[in-house]
Image (cartoon, helix red, strand yellow):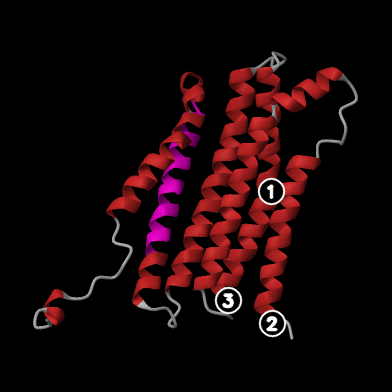
């Protein structure tokens, strides 16, 4: 018999898959002329990035639900909030991809203003989804069935997603000023460095108390 948790997981996975479908295939099918085909091909890198972002949040939810216990109403509410947000988030992702495509094909008429608005919307969605994901791991950490190492790993994930929150906030602030709009997307390029430094310094494995092992051979 399928449990309520299994149905929730299936619903969440389907929602993420639907978001990817909207993003990639929701632009209207086959391009009717060469200009639109050229624009679609120019926007391919942006769609790849957008797909990777949605996949990143989905994989994070998969990890969090493996740590969380069944029947936690807080995890349920955060999951529904994540699904709702990702279905809205796909629209600024598509708009940002279209803006990039217009820029690369030379048809953008208001690069700073339009792209600035797109990155502001994108940043707001990124911050909200990252904050919800951090909350998912914070709830999962409180699962009484977790051992010390799993709880430590969940805490590390909370910190990582808070780093993403802070990065998204900085990037979004840069979109408010015309002179700094071009630097807004570059802030996200710092994530591999900041997360890498944190992951290297963070103690992922719970270390036993040295006083308790002092007398051991």
> Is residue 147 in sight in this rendering?
yes
Distance, label 1 to label 2, CA atoms, is: 28 Å
Q: Earlier in the sequence, mark 1 or mark 3?
A: 3
Distance, label 1 to label 3, CA atoms, is: 23 Å
Residue 145 occupies which quadrant of the picture?
bottom left
**Residue under pointer 2:** 3
**Residue under pointer 3:** 73
Q: Is 178 on the left-hand or right-hand side of 28?
A: left
Which is closer to the viewer, label 3 or label 2? 2
Total marks in image: 3
**Residues at discs 1 and 3 in contact (Cβ within 8 Å):** no
User: Residue sitting at 38 percent across and 64 percent down?
Assistant: 155
Q: Earlier in the sequence, mark 3 or mark 2?
A: 2
Q: Secondary structure at mark 3?
A: helix
Q: Main secondary structure of the magenta part?
A: helix
Residue 211 occupies which quadrant of the picture?
bottom left
Crowdedness of circle 2 by 10 Å Cα count: few (<14), some, many (20+)?
A: few
The x, y position of residue 13, in whole percent, is 69, 62
Distance, label 3 to label 2, CA atoms, is: 15 Å
Residue sticking out furthest to the right:
32
Does 164 sit above or below residue 39?
A: below
User: Residue sitting at 71 percent across and 16 percent down?
Assistant: 105
Q: Which mark is residue 88?
A: 1
Q: Quadrant of the N terminus?
A: bottom right
Q: Is 174 on the left-hand or right-hand side of 42?
A: left
Q: Which residues are magenta?
A: 155-177
Q: Secondary structure at mark 1?
A: helix
């Amino acid at each position: 018999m399928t449990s309520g948790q299994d149905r929730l997981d299936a619903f969440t996975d389907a929602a993420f898959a639907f978001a990817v479908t909207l993003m990639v295939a929701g632009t209207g099918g086959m391009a009717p002329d060469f200009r639109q085909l050229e624009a679609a091909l120019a926007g391919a890198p942006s769609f790849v990035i957008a797909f990777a972002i949605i996949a990143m949040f989905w994989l994070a939810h998969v990890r969090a639900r493996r740590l969380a216990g069944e029947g936690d109403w807080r995890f349920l509410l955060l999951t529904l909030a994540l699904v709702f947000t990702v279905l809205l988030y796909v629209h600024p992702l598509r708009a940002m991809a279209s803006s990039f495509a217009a820029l690369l094909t030379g048809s953008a008429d208001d690069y700073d203003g339009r792209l600035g608005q797109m990155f502001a919307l994108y940043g707001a969605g990124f911050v909200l989804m990252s904050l919800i994901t951090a909350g998912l791991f914070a709830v999962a950490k409180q699962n009484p069935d977790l051992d010390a190492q799993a709880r430590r790993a969940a805490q590390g994930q909370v910190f990582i997603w808070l780093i993403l929150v802070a990065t998204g906030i900085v990037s979004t602030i840069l979109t408010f000023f015309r002179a700094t709009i071009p630097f807004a997307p570059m802030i996200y390029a710092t994530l591999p460095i900041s997360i890498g430094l944190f992951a290297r310094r963070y103690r992922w494995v719970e270390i036993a108390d040295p006083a308790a092992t002092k007398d051991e051979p």
